[in-house]
Amino acid sequence: MMNKIEARSVIKFLHLKGNNTCQIHDEMKAVYGDESPSYDTVVRWKMNFQSDHMSLTDEPQAGSPSIKDDLAMVKKVEAISLDDRRSTMERVMTETGLSYGTAWRIIHE
């Protein structure tokens, strides 16, 4: 299977060579077959390269990180709960700086 970076590299190469979007998609389809990226993907990445965003990697996404990625925070909530089984959400939120929804998700998951 063709990975994202490989596909983006090919799109970038063909873009710099002067090919238009249809030519890039057709050439990739001829070489890679079903593993080639969709036409919409080729359009999106060609537009990125046309606007001088030449990086092949994704830009960081806005939003909060996954709870599961922050094991330290999960352990901190667990420690608060084990310290006092009658801890309130307010205490968890105050001691961790988490929002109500995030604290609730950690406790219930």
Image (cartoon, rainbow, N blue to C red):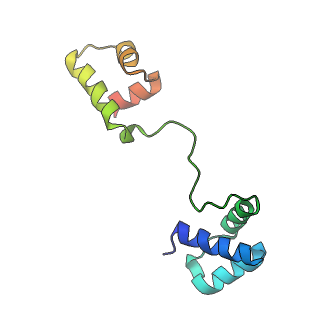
Q: Position of residue 6 (x, y in %)?
A: 54, 72
Residues 29 and 17: in front is 17
What percent of the width, then of the height, locates residue 99? 46, 23
Position of 27 with respect to 99 (left or right) is right
Does residue 48 lie above or below 72 as drawn?
A: below
Residue at horizontal 43%, vertical 24%? 98
Residue 93, percent from left and from top = 40, 18
Quadrant position of residue 5: bottom right
User: Which corner quadrant of the image does residue 62 belong to?
Assistant: top right
- Which residue occupies the foreground of this view, 2 or 6? 6
Identify the residue shown where x is 40% and y is 31%: 105
Q: Quadrant of residue 30?
A: bottom right
Labels in figure, total: 0
| Residue at 66% in and 75% down | 13
20 to the left or right of 80: right
Name of the residue lying farthest toward the bottom = 30
- Position of 32 relative to 55 (above/below): below
Q: Which quadrant is home to the C terminus?
A: top left
**Residue under the point 27% across and 20% down:** 80
In the picture, measured across the screen, residue 12 lies left or right of residue 19, that is left
Q: Position of residue 67 (x, y in %)?
A: 40, 37
